Image (spheres, rainbow, N blue to C red):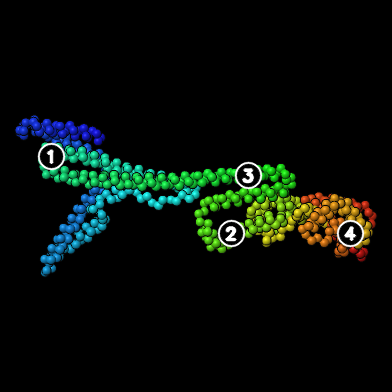
Amino acid sequence: MQKLLIALLFILTVSAAAAQNKDNNKTDPEFVKQKQHLIQEYTATLAAIDNDIPADSVWMKNYSSYLTSIEVKNNLAEVRAKIAKLSKNNRYGQNIDELSALRSKENILSNQMMQLKGKDTTPFAELLTPPEIGEIPPINNPLDIFTGYSFIKQLSNNHEDYIKQKDRLKRLIELLNIKKGVYENLIVLQKDKKTQESLEALKKQLDRFTIALDTINITDSVYKKRIEVIEINLNKKIEEQMYKLTKIGIIVVSLFILSFLIKLIIKKYITDNERFYTANKIITFTNFTLILLILFFNYIENVAYLVTILGFASAGIAIAMKDWFMSILGWLVIVFGGSIHVGDRIRVDMDGMVYVGDVLDISLLRITILEDITLSSYHKNRRAGRIVFIPNNYVFTRMIANYTHHSLKTVWDGIDITITFDSNHKKALNICKEITRKYSKGYTDITRKQLNKLRNNYSLKNTNVEPRIFSFIEPNGVVISCWYLTNAYGTLTLRSTISLEIVEEFNKAGDITISYPTQKLYMEEV
């Protein structure tokens, strides 16, 4: 559209010159007809140019606000001059209504001036000012890399928007220059006051836009250099962080490979599963601790400042995360104290429930056990096979019993059986003693060796490992209590075997009767 307008202006200019150089006889019909045709063509060209200028052009709107501001300012000055003149000549209270109307108009114009504040002096201030750069983000860690790239992209988008604004102004000036040429040619053919005033107003408008274009060109050059400097600095810092991240990544990968190789070596030379698990946990914990320290000292600029903050916040943190801290402390006690190991069979009393099972894992916050079928399951829970999670802080507040501490893998188990008062008590005691000794002999020998090892760590006085048989007088008869050593992981199996053996031997003996609650009924003949 713009090229067509330029071509049309060129043709019309040539036509106007030809018409002017023609016979100067203004009464010549052919001359008058050609003149009218050219005037119509110029008018149509002006209309086409006005249509080509965007209706929502921010430059035209700002210029319109500028003209409105000047007009309002001049009107306000005239109204105030009239008010001053009337007030001076109003000695006898004349022209009161006119003064009141002028003051109301003054208030309206003053409000309009407040809304158009600054438009009369700097009409394009907002458009000429480039977007704010804002605070440059610091690049101190890998996460800031994304922030840096986002900030660079934002600067680039802002600069592109500013360039588009400048391009719109250039296009507008080109159209106005074409419009100016049309007016100049039109004045040659039609020298009227309205056309002359329109041309003068257009020239002023072009002067304003030209000055704005010069200003925006200079501002854009400075703004572009500022953006380039910021981008160079940000890219440099991003490269530094990438290089640092690469170094840390190499170190972390090396630590993982080293820990993996150490675990392979340990697995080759340590055959005991418990010792291997403990060593594996220590290596993993050490590895992650080293990685955390590397990250800590690489990305925390002021360690002393951080320690100070943590010192002030420690009281609140300790209260809010008390259980976590106690669990971590309990983990340290468990691992370094050696009271519980993976594979141990433990008993935990939790909220009125009793859980007996084997330790599967000891993490930083909890102990994981697999509940087994035990005497507790038989008497109380009537459930087994559950995975139970026990917080590490229970070592300070709950009862935790270890059935397989250190090398000791056996426990004392007992069977109570009641016989009548008239039974052969000595024979019953001997039967119970022989049976328990027979089935617990292997565990007795193992326990004797294990207790000898424990003497190095504990003060042991009573090391009697032979089965113990006790008898007690109870209301229903004599209770024989048989105690013997058995494997901590198989107490119910041996208990079941020994119980049935004792019952069979008692039934074979004719002078031993197992007692149980009975009732006797005495009947009298009437």
Q: Which amino acid type is marked by label 3? A: Leu
- Residue bearing mark 2: 321
Which label belongs to residue 419?
4
**What's the CA distance linking mark 2 and mark 1?**
88 Å
Q: Nearer the viewer, residue 105 or 516?
A: 105
User: At which x and y percent is residue 221?
Assistant: 32, 45
**What's the CA distance linking mark 4 and mark 3?**
67 Å
User: At which x and y percent is residue 58?
Assistant: 28, 46
Give the number of marks.
4
Residue 354 in view here: no
Q: Which amino acid type is marked by label 1? A: Ile
Res. 524 image quadrant: bottom right
Q: Nearer the viewer, residue 206 or 252?
A: 252
Residue in the image at 72% along x and 45% along y: 270
- Could you tell which of marks 2 and 4 lies nearer the N-terminus? 2
Q: Kindly indicate whether the residue at mark 4 contacts the one at mark 2 (C-beta within 8 angstroms).
A: no
Q: Residues within 10 Å of mark 1 (few under 14, many from 20)?
A: some
Q: Which mark's residue is nearer the viewer, 4 or 3?
A: 3
**What's the CA distance linking mark 3 and mark 1?**
92 Å
Which label belongs to residue 187?
1
Q: Which mark's residue is nearer the viewer, 3 or 1?
A: 3
**What's the CA distance linking mark 3 and mark 2?**
34 Å
Mark 3 element type: helix
Q: Kindly indicate whether the residue at mark 4 contacts the one at mark 1 (C-beta within 8 angstroms).
A: no
Res. 8 image quadrant: top left
**What's the CA distance linking mark 2 and mark 4?**
57 Å
